Amino acid sequence: ANKWTFYFLDQDEIDFLEKFQEEDAIHEFGKYAKVEVGITTGSNPFFTVPLSTVEQYDLEKYAKPLVGRSVQVPSAIFTNEDWTRNRENEARTHLLTFPLMKDLNGSLGAREYIKYGEDLKIHEGYKCSIRDEWQVVPSLRISDALFIRRNNLFPKLIINEAKAYTTDTMHRVTVKSNVEIKALTASYYNSLSLAFSEICGRSHGGGVLELMPNEVERILLPYNGNNADLLPKIDKMVREKKDISGLLKITNKKILKDNLGFSQADINMADGIWKKLSNRRLNRGK
């Protein structure tokens, strides 16, 4: 059932990973959270806009906070300060959530902007054309966390502290009952989970690793409530763009060794598998 990537590993590495898949000590991501695609706008260039467009057409009433690109997320926690900084830099930080035309009332700027979209034939695109009214974007829901869909060095799981909407460039992660979001996020940042992210995902041109929602839910996640203590350190090191290997030395000790009883040899095996698969993917992209 594993992807072909699995078979670039040696037999002892395959046996090591299959042992955890067969045992019940470490569960899959999907046990703790539901993962689904982000909002499909039908035309991101039209529905996701910078502050200048909001001001030009007087769209404040319909503009909601948005994080639309992975470069806008610098860490493991997306804060209000991060969103404000993106907005000041004229990034596309607003999602336009128009109502039905009859409910626009005196919103002349919104009517003008929608007319501008029709001049561009945005309404004739497939996703927009199948709606009752093309300018009404469906599935407007904010998630607890975000998972980057397409990744370079490693896939990031990010707490959505800013309560921002996201497009289908990111997945929406909603934690299940009795699961603590900080513990879940911290628990993800370890070599075993990153190794499974390489196996569950798929590699594209340029060394890009893509994971769809069902693939994210298959990643083995050694969840423990006490892992939340690691989150400030994880967030700081990711934000400062520290080498991921240095971060994993810290997280592996608590998440894998202290909580699960991994030997140093086990940790080295998990880390070696992740590095082998990620390096192969990245080198293919060069």
Image (cartoon, rainbow, N blue to C red):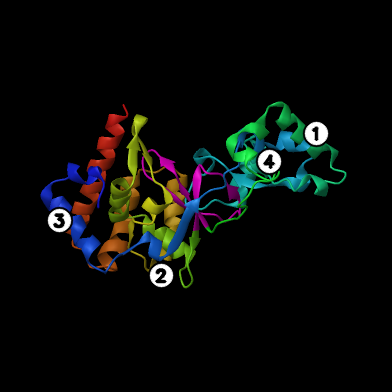
Residue under label 3, please give it.
Answer: 15
Q: State which mark lies toward you, 3 or 1.
A: 1
Q: CA distance from mark 4 to mark 2?
A: 44 Å
As helix, strand or loop, the secondary structure at mark 4 comes to loop
Mark found first going from the N terminus, 2 or 1:
1
* Mark 2 residue type: Gly
Q: Nearer the viewer, mark 1 or mark 4?
A: 4
**The magenta stretch spans which residues?**
145-173
Q: Which residue is mark 4?
A: 134
Q: What's the amino acid at mark 1? A: Glu
**Mark 4 or mark 1, which is nearer the start of the sequence?**
1
- Residue highlighted by disc 2: 225
The disc, 2 or 3, on the residue closer to the chain's N-terminal end is 3
Q: Position of residue 98 (x, y in %)?
A: 73, 45
201 relative to 31, above or below: above
Amino acid of disc 4:
Trp
Q: Which tag, 3 or 1, sits closer to the chain's start?
A: 3
Q: Residue furthest bottom?
A: 178
In the rendered structure, the answer to whether residue 162 lies left or right of residue 2 reads right
